[in-house]
Image (cartoon, rainbow, N blue to C red):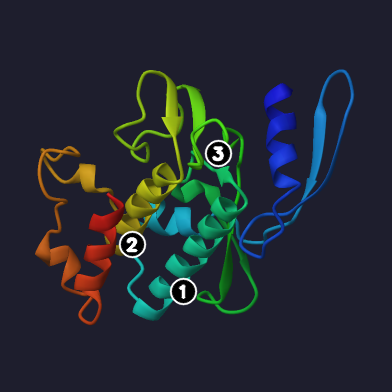
C-alpha cells in the first residue's frame, strides 16, 4: 500500500492532457481504491504492435503519436518526476473519432520517483533501490542496487518505443544484436517505407539509445 500511496502522491501533481488523470483515491485497512480518467480504447497501440504485429505506416500519425509521448515525458520531467517504466503497454489511448484520431495517455507511475536536485548537486536525479522496469525498455546503466538515475532512462525507453512504432519490433529482436554490440540496427527492408523522414527518425532513435 505504501507503493500505491507514493504513486498517487505523484499523480496528484500531474495534470496534463497526455497523462491519465487521478481524480481521487480512498483507502481502508484492506485496500486502496483510485478513481481515474476513463480511456475508451486503452490497448490501441499495444494491440497494433504486439498482436497485429503492424507498424504505424502513416507518417503524419507516427509524428502525432511520437509528439504526444514526448510532450508527456517533457511535462513529467519539468515537474521533477522520473517515470522509470515507460513502455508501450503504459501508453493508453482515448479515441475521439476515427481510428487515427486518438489522444495518447501515459499511465502507471508505480515505480516513478521524484528527482532530488539537492541530493545530487542540482542534477535531476533519483535513487532506484534495485533494478526496476520492464525488460527490453530498461537502459543498460540500470543495474545493481542504489542506482542513481535521471530523466535519461525515460528517453532511452522512448527510443525503444519509437523504434517499435516504426517497425513493430524492438532493436534487440534483430538476430544476434544486443545494446552496446554496435550501431543500432536499421534493416533497410523494414525502414524504406518511411520515405520522407526515415533518416530523421533513425537519427532521433540513435540519440535516445
Q: Nearer the viewer, mark 3 or mark 2?
A: 3
Is label 2 or label 1 in front?
Answer: 1
Q: Secondary structure at mark 3?
A: loop
Q: What is the number of the mark on residue 117?
A: 3
Judge by depth and name the residue closer to the eye, 48 or 28.
28
Label 2: state its secondary structure. Answer: loop
Q: Nearer the viewer, mark 1 or mark 3?
A: 3
Q: Is residue 168 visible?
A: no
Quadrant of residue 201 within the rendered picture: bottom left
Q: CA distance from mark 1 to mark 3?
A: 32 Å
Residue beneath label 2, please? 54
Instruction: Using the image as rendered, state which of residue 122 and residue 13 is in the foreground.
Output: 122
- Taking the spot 54% from the left edge, 51% from the top edge, the residue there is 77
Mark nearer the N terminus (2 vs 1): 2
Q: Element at badge 1? A: helix
Up the image or down, 51 lies above or below 95; here it is above
Q: Position of residue 80 (x, y in %)?
A: 59, 46
Amino acid at each position: 500500500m505504501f507503493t500505491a500511496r507514493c504513486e498517487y502522491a505523484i499523480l496528484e501533481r500531474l495534470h496534463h492532457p497526455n497523462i491519465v488523470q487521478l481524480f481521487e483515491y480512498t483507502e481502508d485497512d484492506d485496500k486502496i481504491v483510485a478513481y481515474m480518467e476513463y480511456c475508451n480504447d486503452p490497448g490501441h497501440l499495444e494491440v497494433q504492435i504486439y498482436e497485429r504485429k503492424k507498424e504505424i505506416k502513416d507518417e503524419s500519425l507516427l509524428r502525432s503519436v511520437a509528439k504526444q509521448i514526448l510532450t508527456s515525458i517533457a511535462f513529467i520531467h519539468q515537474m521533477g518526476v522520473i517515470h522509470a517504466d515507460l513502455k508501450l503497454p503504459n501508453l493508453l489511448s482515448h479515441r475521439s473519432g476515427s481510428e487515427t484520431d486518438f489522444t495518447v495517455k501515459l499511465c502507471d507511475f508505480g515505480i516513478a520517483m521524484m528527482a532530488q536536485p539537492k541530493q545530487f548537486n542540482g542534477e535531476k536525479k533519483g535513487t532506484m533501490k534495485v533494478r526496476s522496469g520492464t525488460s527490453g525498455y530498461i537502459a543498460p546503466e540500470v543495474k545493481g542496487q542504489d542506482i542513481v538515475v535521471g530523466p535519461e532512462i525515460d528517453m532511452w525507453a522512448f527510443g525503444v518505443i519509437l523504434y517499435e512504432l516504426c517497425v513493430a519490433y524492438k532493436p534487440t529482436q534483430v538476430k544476434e544484436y544486443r545494446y552496446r554490440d554496435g550501431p543500432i540496427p536499421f534493416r533497410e527492408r523494414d525502414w524504406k517505407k518511411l520515405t520522407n523522414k526515415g533518416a530523421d527518425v533513425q537519427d532521433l532513435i540513435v540519440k535516445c539509445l
